[in-house]
Every structure is written in structure tokens, then in C-alpha cells.
Amino acid sequence: MGILGATKGTVLEPQIEQLLNLEKDGSAAYLALAYVARQQGHAKLAEELEHIGADEARHAGLYAIMNGKVTEDLRPVLANIAKQELKAEIALAPIVDKCRELELYEVADEIEKAAKEEMRHGAIIHGLIEKYL
């Protein structure tokens, strides 16, 4: 892959790292705004913001590749990710419990939903490894 690790160890590495962080933050911001827009009944606005957020995440991925944050050996990386994703419910349980203790029930419910999605991602990744790698 031509761009994999191309900027790692160069004078560009800190700038690419900064771009990576800006794109990650931008992606999160757009997706958060999309959530709010959807809650306010602006489905089309939310959809557009989600697309922009996905583009920003893709940009972050490119910068991560450039700075060598991933390797070409997909199987062990994906296996580790799947393992972590499958632990989400257990890992997030203390936060969910604390939210409920603070009577932040809607927050607790959203974190629980996210944890279930993470676990689903782990299962999907595991299946993809078995199928393709």
C-alpha cells in the first residue's frame, strides 16, 4: 500500500497526527449534531450530517494509514478489535450503573445500546475474519 506508514518518522508525522485528531473530532461533532437534528425532527438534515461525519471518519482513517497506525497484517489487528468489541458490555457496565445511580436513565440506556452495538460489531468482525482471512 503506497500510503501505509509513508509519513511515519518524517517531519510530516506531527502534522498528519494533528489532522488525524481534527478529523476524528470533526466526525464525532457531525454525528453528534446529526443525533440532535434527528431528535428535533430534521431527518434530512441529520442524514446529510451523518454523511459528512462518515467522510470525516474516512479522512481520519487515511491519516491513520499515513502515520502507520495500522499494519498490512489484517487478521491479528481485526482479531484484537473483535475481542475488545465483544467485551464492551462488561467494560461499560460500571458507567451504566453510575449513570443510573445519578438518575441519568436515558444516558444509561444509550450507553447500553452502544455496548450492544459494539458487541455486534465484534461478532461481525469475527465472522469477517473467518470468511476472508
Image (cartoon, rainbow, N blue to C red):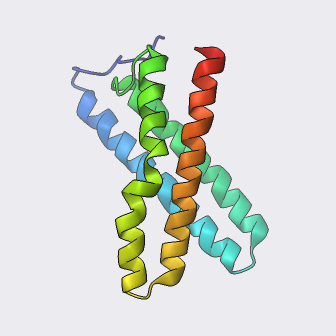
Residue reaching furthest to the top: 1
Q: Pinpoint residue 21: horizontal percent, then vertical percent.
A: 36, 46
Left or right, 94 with respect to 61, comes to left
Q: Splitting the image into 4 quarters, where does residue 77 fall? A: top left
Residue 42 higher or lower than 26, as above or below: below
Q: Residue furthest bottom?
A: 103
Quadrant location of residue 76? top left
Does 1 sit above or below residue 65? above
User: At x 39% / y 74%, what residue is drawn?
Assistant: 97
The answer to which image quadrant residue 65 occupies is top left
Could you tell me residue 55's position as x and y percent?
59, 44
* Relative vertical location of residue 3 with respect to residue 62 in this rendering, above or below: above
Position of residue 116 relative to residue 38, above or below, is: above
Q: Taking 83 as reference, is 45 left or right?
A: right
For the C terminus, the quadrant is top right
Q: Residue at x 58, y 42 (%)?
A: 121
- At which x and y percent is residue 68? 34, 23
The residue that appears at 35% across and 67% down in the rendered structure is 94
Q: Nearer the viewer, residue 35 or 17?
A: 35
Between residue 45 and residue 71, name the one nearer to us: 71
Outermost right residue: 44
Front residue (pair 132, 17) = 132
**60 on left or right of 122:** left
For the point 47% across and 30% down, which residue is it? 62
- Left or right: residue 119 versus residue 50 is left
Count the marks. Answer: 0
